[in-house]
Amino acid sequence: MNQTGYSYLELSVVIAMVTLLFLVSGPIYAIQLQKQQTQLITRQISNDLYLAANEARTKQIIYYFNIVQPGLYMLSSSQQSQKKARTLPKGYSLKSNFFNNRIVFNAYGRPTSGGTLTLTDPKGSIQRFVIQIVSGRFRVADG
């Protein structure tokens, strides 16, 4: 008799192999997803720092980057009441060593003081934004 198809044993082996593949790749996928989210948040904070400096320079006003809470920061200017609030996802926190947790960009787009912003993700990994007063630039550093 000529039978076509797969036996129960062959199907069971294939299902077991696929299950094992998902068990191994699941945590790796979660780690990669966490890294991508951290990179996205790091880019957003970098873009907001550039925005604050550029708005101050182009409009010739003082612009603020305020950390209101560890998971919330705001962008605002000295001449407008409109504020842009940014909320970080759950588990992320942003801290600084600036006075009153505020970075002040003068009318030339330069920060009035230097310091560090520290972004911590839910796993405890740290990204630092080092802000230099002399050049007005900043850089992102791991750990």
Image: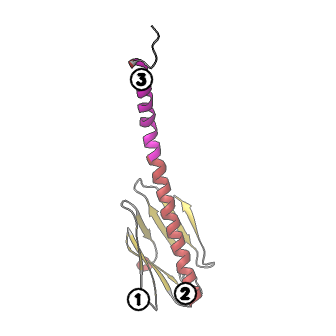
Within 10 Å of disc 3 (Cα), the crowding (few <14, some 14-19, many 20+) is few
Query: Quick check: marks 1 and 2 in contact, CB under 8 Å?
Result: no
What's drawn in magenta, residue-wise? 9-29
Say if residue 107 shows up in the picture. Answer: no
Q: Quadrant of residue 57?
A: bottom right
Identify the mark nearer the N-term, 1 or 2.
1
SS of the residue under disc 1: loop
Amino acid at pointer 3: Leu
Numbered disc in front, either 1 or 3: 3
Query: Quick check: marks 2 and 3 in contact, CB under 8 Å?
Result: no
In which quadrant is the N terminus drawn?
Answer: top left
Within 10 Å of disc 2 (Cα), the crowding (few <14, some 14-19, many 20+) is some
> Residue 16 location in percent, x, y?
41, 27
> Residue 100 location in percent, x, y?
41, 79
Amino acid at pointer 1: Ser
> Residue 54 location in percent, x, y?
57, 81
Amino acid at pointer 2: Asn
Q: CA distance from mark 1 to mark 2?
A: 17 Å
Task: Indicate whether residue 12 is drawn in magenta.
Answer: yes
- Residue at mark 2: 106
**Residue under the image location 50 percent in, 69 percent down:** 45
- Residue at mark 3: 11
**Residue under the image location 48 percent in, 64 percent down:** 41
- Residue at mark 1: 81
Identify the mark nearer the N-term, 2 or 3.
3
Q: Is residue 52 left or right of residue 12?
A: right
Q: CA distance from mark 2 to mark 3?
A: 69 Å
